[in-house]
Structures are given as C-alpha cells and as structure tokens.
Amino acid sequence: VILNHYGIIDGDKMRLKLKYQGKEKVLNLKAKDYNSKTFNILNESKNIDETLIQKKAYWIKELKNLNSLYFQYNDCEEREDFKIKEVIDFIKKSNLNRLIIDLRNNKGGDSDVLVPLIHFLREREDEISLIILTGRDTYSSAIINLMSLKNIKNSITLGEIPHGGPTHFQEPKSFILPQTNIELSCSTMIYRSRGYGFTDSFKPKYIVNTKMEDFLSGKDTQMEFIRKYIWK
C-alpha cells in the first residue's frame, strides 16, 4: 500500500534501473506472495550438522567430540513438555563442565524464561566454562539474555554480530488502522543497555561469520571454530 501510494511500484510490479561503473541495467520485478514457499538450502543438504537444525523452541544434548553440553535456545518461550528447570536438571546430572548456549536463531519473546538458567550458571561460574553463540537473527529478548550471560565468569561470546542491538525497542503491541483495516505492530517499551546507544551493535569476542562454502554444504562454521581454536 505504501509503495503504491508513493509511486514506487505499480500494483505488484516494479521497474528497477541499476547503474554501476558506467553500465546500466533495467530489471522488471514482480512481488511474490508472502505465503509462497521459500527455498531453504539446509533442506537440500544431505549431511547437515545437527547444531544447524532448529528442532524446537530449545533442546540440549551432550557433544562427545567437544566434551561439552550444547543448548540450542531458539525462542524465548518455555516448552510445556520440557521446562527450563528440566534443562538445569540435565546440566546438573551431567559430569561435563563445558556448556554452549546457542542464541543464533533466537528472535526474542519473554526474556524471563531463561532467568533460572542464568542464575544457576552464575552460582557455578567457577565450575562451568561457557560459550554463547550469536547470529544475525539474535534479537530483542535474546539480546537481553545475551547481555546477562556474557557477564558470567569464564564466558566467551562467539559468532556473527547480531542485527538486534543491546539498546532497543521491545514489547510490540498490535492495532488496526481504521481507514484501511491494516494491522500494524508498534513497540511500547525501550530497553536500555549501559554503554550502548540505539545504533550500537553488540560485537562478540570472536567474530566468526558463516562461510558460504559451509552454508552450501550444511556445515556449522561457528562450531568448527570452537573445535579448532577454543576447545581443542
């Protein structure tokens, strides 16, 4: 609606003129229905590293090759069939003192869900070595959890720079425009993190960007970095 109003597109079509180093090219583009199926290259790879597969809101397992525990936290939402308390119990029962918390695909939710685990790790910060994985899709409440986890003793942050900033708007609420009946969302709160402005990004200690060749073959660049350089 907005693009049509300003004449940027005509219906569902747009004519795009590109210029680069004296050369010019015109592209005729057509909008795609947002319900259309998108191509996921991970679904096409035959041998995908398990740490790249988003199974549920969160899951945990032992990684024998790293002598560590791996906790993939994809949504800040508690599972009814596997509470965070059970995750803590899983860690307690294990005799491993290394833990990887993967926030790479977490776009947010309720930051309080992870608080019991954060408190548990703080109480045992002299016993557990912690790595927090970040990614471009780490946003909102996941950033709040990240800022708490990074302050735990013996913790290391590693991965890509998150697109979500430590100081950000949150708590979105929806409303409907009366004239167009279009539903919009707008943040209703500001979360401020000391030392970070609205345009500042969090930079992990080890910035490890996903390699294209790894992405195409289903290999986990960040986990491979841990194997080679952190926990050899």
Image (tube, helix red, strand yellow):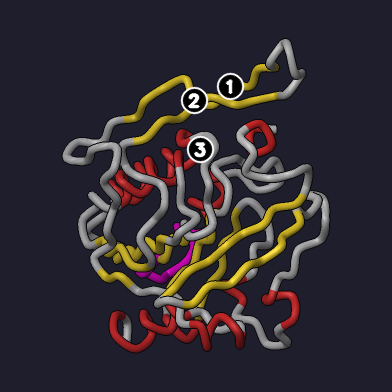
Q: Position of residue 142 (x, y in %)?
A: 45, 45
- Which residue reaches farthest top? 178
Give the numbered dot on residue 113. 3
Q: How far separated are the C-alphas under marks 1 and 3? A: 20 Å
Q: Quadrant of residue 180?
A: top right
Sequence order check, earlier mark of 3 and 2? 3
Q: How far separated are the C-alphas under marks 3 and 2? A: 20 Å
> Of residues 91 and 185, which is closer to you in this image?
185
User: What residue sits right under mark 1 in the picture?
Assistant: 173
**Tally of numbered discs:** 3
Between disc 3 and disc 2, the foreground one is: 2
Sequence order check, earlier mark of 1 and 3? 3
**As shown in the figure, which amino acid type bears the numbered disc 1?**
Lys
Is residue 92 inside the magenta stretch? yes
User: What residue sits right under mark 2 in the picture?
Assistant: 187
Q: Is 13 positioned to the left or the right of 132 in the image?
A: right
* Labels 2 & 1 near each other (Cβ < 8 A): yes
Magenta-highlighted residues: 90-99
